[in-house]
Image (cartoon, rainbow, N blue to C red):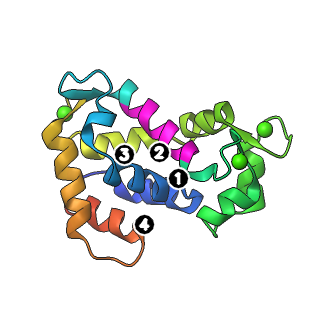
Amino acid sequence: MKLPFAHTCALLACGSFLLLTQCATEDTYSRLDANADGKSTRKEFDAYMKQGFFHRIDIDNDRLITFSEWQAFNPKVTQSQFLNADLNRDGYISRAESDKRFDRDGSLTKLFNVIDVDKNGTLSNEEAAAFRSALNLTNAATPIERLMKAAQSYE
Ligand SMILES: [Ca+2]
Ligand SMILES: [Ca+2]
Ligand SMILES: [Ca+2]
């Protein structure tokens, strides 16, 4: 199966995937499957990833992301990327602004499609576990490299 991974890699520059990789790997499936029916819908996946992303960057837990908080997590983030996400230009990224950024860049769609091997629109326990295993099998230096190797193993 061929994935549009060259396109996915373009998103790595913005840093979202680095965070998504960590969200997808370190938590139990039960948290992803919010209503515990044995599968994760796209809606559950999105809610989980958006919450996980925001929570990890907002170090001081004040519900706002500053440029330095983002930079602490991803040293490669640029001012223009921050400004791009800060829609109302108040110097902070709110949860709503963070969520909208994901909706615009399409990174959640791409990640979901990688994990959803049988393309039925939901992630089974097995699909989520397989993705985690693929990531755990890689021994690259950075989360981004691990993600790229894991996704290559799906091709
Ligand atoms: Ca904060
Ligand atoms: Ca803002
Ligand atoms: Ca599936």
Q: Which residues are magenta?
A: 45-55
Image quadrant of residue 127? top left
Q: Which mark is residue 16?
A: 1
Residue 1 in sight from this viewpoint: no
Real-space Cα separation, disc 2 to disc 3, in angstroms: 6 Å
Real-space Cα separation, disc 4 to disc 2, in angstroms: 14 Å
- Label 2, on which residue? 107
Q: Which mark is residue 144?
A: 4
Prevailing secondary structure class for the magenta stretch in the rendered image: helix
Q: Amino acid at mark 1?
A: Ser
Q: Is residue 149 above or below residue 65?
A: below
> Pointer 2 and pointer 1: residues touching (CB < 8 Å)?
yes
> Pointer 4 and pointer 2: residues touching (CB < 8 Å)?
no
Q: Which mark is residue 104?
A: none
Judged by depth in the image, the label closer to the viewer, 4 or 2, is 4
Q: Is residue 116 above or below residue 7?
A: above
Of helix, strand and loop, which one carries label 2?
helix
Q: Is mark 1 within 8 Å of ligand 2?
A: no
- Binning the other alpha carbons within 10 Å of mark 4 as few (below 14), some (14 to 19) or many (20 upward) gives many
> Residue at the location (75% across, 56% down)?
67
Residue furthest right in the image: 90
- Label 3, on which residue? 111
Please report whichever mark, 3 or 1, sits nearer to the chain's N-terminal start: 1
Residue 113 in sight from this viewpoint: yes
